[in-house]
């Protein structure tokens, strides 16, 4: 299949930038324990993440004066919003995190370059990266009118521990003790030193919840935050209506610095790809994160729409159950990997809007710091694949391959076809994202392989959730003592050169063991009507921010 030349040129330019960044390498300087002081933040800046992210495509900013639409309808990506509760393991989709960004505030905020700036905390400091002291704003109220205090922060952290398998639990897990000093001062003591902990405080699922709201109404209380929008209506796996919070502490209504032009934003899951195009054409929706690959060309040529391609940071990966006697066999995994044509899988998954070529064979985020680009790619070689298969424990059994969302289901079906060429029988199990996410987080030996996207953020420490035994995202039950030891050691290491070496070694071991194998990079086509702007497109997709979304009706 012939690829879109403009898209290929764009991807190649991004790859060149990433390669240049990798070639330069991270700084070898050792940051001071207290960090560097950011401009006008009043806080303490943690050490730099060790790399430079490719800036996202520019999105129009809100004009000074415009005829703004009161309401905007947004089609989310291929992941439904099943629940609005960061403690629930079903709330692991990217689009659910977008809701979290809208309705909660986090203690810190982070931009696409890894710079932290105030959120609910106005000052933050640490001397040893194990005890963190934060000063909170004293003018913040929840959507129900209750004042937010340090007790709500403490309760949010402690309540997250009950959410087994949830993103919130994974993010707050390092916190061993929460000391409330006053209504506006709090101290967090970790179970060990963690130089990346600042990233946890800025992750969407670590927004602060109201203790009184959740205790009064366990079913819907988790939707009460302090953020720019509040939940006005919600139908699971269908839509969520967000209404502007005019009492938001950070909005221009209160003399803050953020402009919130839209009164109501609806985030809508539309499972039928054809229906998404019709809704955009008719302007029933004005922004789509889930436009079908076959429809993008129409919007590219339309004078009424604009689009942005975004290479996703998360690997779209094939993962193996390491505890199953067949898929836990190294020779079987090698047979599978050598039998795959990655470019064909990418084309089958999303045509021009998936990328099956790489700058290295590592399993890592596309723009995550400390990416090891010295690991060679695995080339398709059917003869070698058959040799590995003959040495494995496979004896013609049917292997269950679970997948969710249309892109990954198509990719799984292509994997099924390719593996049949060497005699491996695959059954593709299609399911919704929430079911697959919960199934893999809790573990299920019946699903020997899974096609999934592994969440790796701009925090290099986020790979811990994929490789560390017992953590939620380690769906494959991967347990390598050397990797575990390195993941523990790198959390306390402040020297950038040493950290790079540790992360490089982790990637080398994972590339040999192959619990996960990166199949392609998803290139997301974001399509929007003329006059729409004011949203961010971070590489890790989890931090997508639509608080400033607008639609200028006169554009």
Image (cartoon, helix red, strand yellow):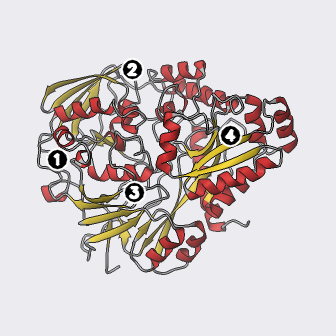
User: Relative to the observer, which residue lies in front, 327 or 357?
Assistant: 327
Measure the alpha-carbon separation of dots 3 and 4: 29 Å
Question: Which residue, given by chain and number where applicable, does mark 4 sit on?
Answer: 361
Q: CA distance from mark 1 to mark 2?
A: 32 Å
For marks 2 and 3, the one nearer the N-term is 2
Q: Which residue is mark 1?
A: 142
Q: Residue at x 20, y 44 (%)?
A: 217
How far is the residue under mark 1 from the one under mark 3?
25 Å
* CA–CA distance in space, label 2 to label 3: 32 Å
Up-down relation of residue 414 to residue 443 (above or below): below
Percent of width and height locating residue 318 = 64, 43
Q: Earlier in the sequence, mark 3 or mark 4?
A: 4
Left or right of 319: which side holds 47? left
Query: Which mark sits nearer the N-terminus, 1 or 2?
Result: 1
In the rendered image, which residue does mark 2 sit on? 193
On the image, the x and y values in percent for residue 227 come to: 24, 50
**Residue 412 seen in the figure:** yes
Mark pair 4, 2: CA separation: 31 Å
Secondary-structure class at tag 2 = loop
Name the quarter where the C terminus is drawn.
Answer: bottom left
Q: In terms of sequence position, does the residue under pointer 4 or pointer 2 come before the other?
A: 2
Residue 374: x percent and y percent?
A: 68, 35
Residue 52 visible in the picture: no
Secondary structure type for disc 4: loop
Helix, strand or loop for disc 3: loop
Q: Nearer the viewer, mark 1 or mark 2?
A: 1
- Numbered mark located on residue 200 in the image: none
Question: Does label 1 or label 3 sit earlier along the sequence?
Answer: 1
Dot label at residue 536: 3
Between discs 4 and 1, the one toward the N terminus: 1
């Amino acid at each position: 299949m012939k690829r879109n030349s403009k898209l290929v040129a764009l991807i190649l330019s991004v790859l060149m930038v990433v390669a240049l960044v990798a070639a330069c390498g991270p700084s070898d300087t050792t940051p001071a324990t207290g960090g560097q002081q950011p401009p006008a933040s009043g806080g303490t800046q943690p050490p730099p993440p060790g790399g430079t992210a490719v800036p996202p495509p520019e999105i129009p900013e809100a004009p000074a004066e415009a005829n703004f639409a009161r309401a905007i309808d947004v089609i989310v990506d291929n992941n439904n919003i099943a629940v609005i509760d960061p403690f629930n393991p079903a709330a692991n989709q990217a689009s659910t995190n977008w809701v979290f960004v809208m309705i909660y505030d986090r203690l810190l905020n982070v931009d696409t370059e890894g710079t932290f700036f105030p959120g609910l905390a106005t000052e933050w400091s640490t001397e040893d990266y194990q005890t963190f002291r934060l000063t909170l704003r004293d003018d913040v109220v929840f959507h129900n009118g209750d004042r937010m205090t340090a007790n709500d922060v403490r309760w949010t952290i402690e309540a997250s521990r009950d959410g087994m398998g949830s993103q919130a639990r994974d993010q707050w897990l390092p916190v061993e003790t929460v000391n409330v000093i006053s209504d506006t001062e709090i101290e967090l003591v970790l179970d060990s030193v963690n130089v990346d902990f600042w990233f946890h405080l800025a992750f969407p699922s670590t927004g602060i919840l109201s203790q009184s709201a959740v205790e009064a109404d366990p079913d819907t209380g988790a939707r009460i935050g302090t953020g720019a929008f509040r939940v006005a209506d919600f139908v699971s796996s269908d839509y969520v209506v967000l209404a502007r919070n005019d009492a938001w502490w950070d909005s221009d209504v209160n003399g803050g610095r953020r402009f919130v032009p839209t009164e109501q934003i609806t985030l809508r899951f539309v499972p039928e790809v054809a229906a998404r195009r019709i809704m955009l054409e008719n302007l029933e929706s004005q922004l789509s994160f889930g436009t079908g690959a076959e429809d993008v060309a129409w919007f590219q040529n339309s004078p009424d729409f604009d689009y942005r391609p975004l290479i996703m940071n998360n690997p779209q990966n094939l993962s193996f159950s390491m505890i199953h006697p067949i898929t836990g066999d190294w020779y079987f995994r090698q047979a599978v990997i050598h039998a795959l044509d990655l470019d064909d899988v990418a084309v089958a998954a999303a045509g021009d809007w998936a990328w099956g070529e790489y700058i290295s064979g590592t399993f890592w985020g596309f723009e995550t710091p400390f990416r090891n680009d010295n690991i060679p790619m695995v080339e398709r070689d059917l003869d070698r694949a058959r040799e590995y298969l003959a040495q494995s424990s496979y004896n013609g059994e049917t292997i269950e391959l679970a997948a969710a969302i249309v892109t990954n289901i198509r990719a799984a079906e292509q994997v099924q076809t390719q593996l049949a060429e060497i005699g491996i029988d695959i059954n593709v199990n299609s399911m919704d994202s929430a079911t697959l996410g919960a199934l893999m987080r809790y573990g299920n030996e019946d699903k020997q392989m899974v096609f999934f996207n592994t969440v790796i953020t701009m925090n290099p420490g986020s790979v811990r959730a994929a490789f560390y035994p017992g953590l939620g995202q380690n769906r494959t039950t991967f347990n390598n003592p050397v990797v575990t030891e390195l993941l523990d050691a790198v959390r306390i290491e402040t020297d950038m050169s040493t950290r790079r070496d540790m992360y490089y070694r982790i990637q080398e071991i994972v590339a040999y063991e192959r619990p996960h194998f990166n199949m392609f990079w998803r290139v997301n086509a974001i399509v929007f009507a003329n006059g729409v702007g004011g949203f961010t497109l971070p590489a890790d997709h989890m931090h997508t921010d639509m608080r400033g979304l607008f639609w200028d009706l006169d554009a």
